[in-house]
Image (cartoon, rainbow, N blue to C red):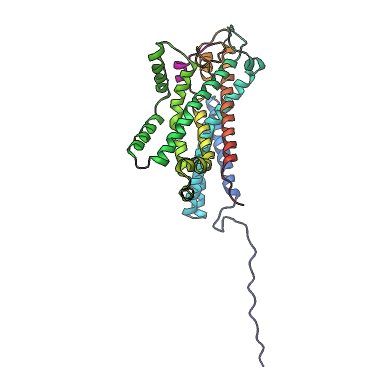
Amino acid sequence: MTATISPPRPTTPPARSASLTTGRLPKWAPWALLAGSIAIVGVIFAVLAAASGAGLNVPGWLILSALVYLVLITVISTIVEGRRKAVDRLVTGVVTLAFLIAMVPLVSVAFTVVTLGAPSWSGEFFSSSMRNVVGEGGGALHAIVGTVLITLAAAVISIPIGIFTAIYLIEYGQNNRLARGITFLVDVMTGIPSIVAGLFAYALFALFLGPGIRLGIMGSIALAVLMIPVVVRSTEEMLRLVPNELREASYALGVPKWLTIAKVVLPTAIAGITTGVMLSISRVIGETAPLLITAGFTASMNYDLFDGRMQTLPVFTYTQYMNQGIPAEAFIGRAWASALTLIVIVMLLNLVARSIAKFFAPKTGR
């Protein structure tokens, strides 16, 4: 009788952390290379600045540090991890660098407007107009009211036209010559300069009321011309996303087409349509050129769109900065405060659009 000896069980080697010998860079390696690149290039720029007597070139320092990092991470990753992973790290670094560069002007504008405009915010700024004010004091209440009224009237004009046009193009005008013509005109209107919309509104009213006329409703017409193509395009895309199965199920139940659109298609796409409408309002609320031609500017309150000139925040900002009086700091402060107010209004509109889109979005899951 012979005893059988079972072979020894293979032992699993203990897991090792990633290192330069495992074909994979450790997680801290990219951050260490980035910090090293910034430090080395910073020392070089500091020495050059001290030798020349000039200040430290911060943008050049950061850009050159990013380029050195991209070269280092690509070379080291190629040696350790292979060419495929090195290309992935290079592309990731380039995309991240592009994102940071794109964020620089946005952050810079926001920081500048907040730091220069916030000190001029006061109760007087939001509760008074510029009537009989030649120096310090006064406010932008008349401009805020004018902006709200003109933009609201433009929305009332453009939103129904834009939505009904998009409904015709998607639901009724498939492969239709008229629909193709409308689509072409919408594409052309999307790219027209804003000053052209202002000239159109001015010429339209000048034919009936004579030259030199300035009315708030003229500014609303000009802004509506700019809003309509945006509303049409955004509504078109949202209606295309509605599954045809929903339409066919409604038709199978004997529901007419107009009722299917009203009760099935539009409620399904209402979140995206609302977002597009809000974005179109945010796009035109800061226009200056068409409002200078149509609504003009005034220092007094005006609540009537059909009677007299009407001030708006973009025009108020422009006139305060370009027509500086004594002291100039008061005019520049009001201009920055008006710009900050306009940015806050646009931000609130976008937050409202996101909230409405989230509220009306179709609920998924159980």
Q: Is residue 31 magenta?
A: no
Rendered location of residue 115, percent (x, y): 61, 23
Decide which of 191, 65 is in the foreground and name it: 191
Q: Is residue 103 left or right of residue 7?
A: left
Q: Is residue 208 left or right of residue 141?
A: left
Q: Report the quarter where the N terminus lies.
A: bottom right
Q: Residue at x 39, y 29 (%)?
A: 189
Q: Is residue 77 above or below residue 41?
A: below
Looking at the image, the residue that sits furthest to the left is: 177
Rendered location of residue 366, percent (x, y): 62, 52
Asked if one can make out residue 91 in the rendered structure from this viewpoint, the answer is: yes
Q: Is residue 288 magenta?
A: yes
Q: Residue at x 51, y 48 (%)?
A: 89
Quadrant assignment, res 181: top left
Q: Is residue 280 above or below residue 222?
A: below
Decide which of 239, 222 is in the foreground and name it: 239
Rendered location of residue 99, percent (x, y): 52, 38
Asked if one can make out residue 101 in the rendered structure from this viewpoint, the answer is: no
Rendered location of residue 218, percent (x, y): 46, 18
Q: Residue at x 61, y 9 (%)?
A: 136
Q: Is residue 328 above or below residue 107?
A: above
Numbered label tally: 0
Looking at the image, the residue that sits furthest to the front is: 254
Decide which of 353, 110 is in the foreground and name it: 353
Decide which of 154, 128 is in the foreground and name it: 154
Q: Which region is colored magenta?
A: 287-298
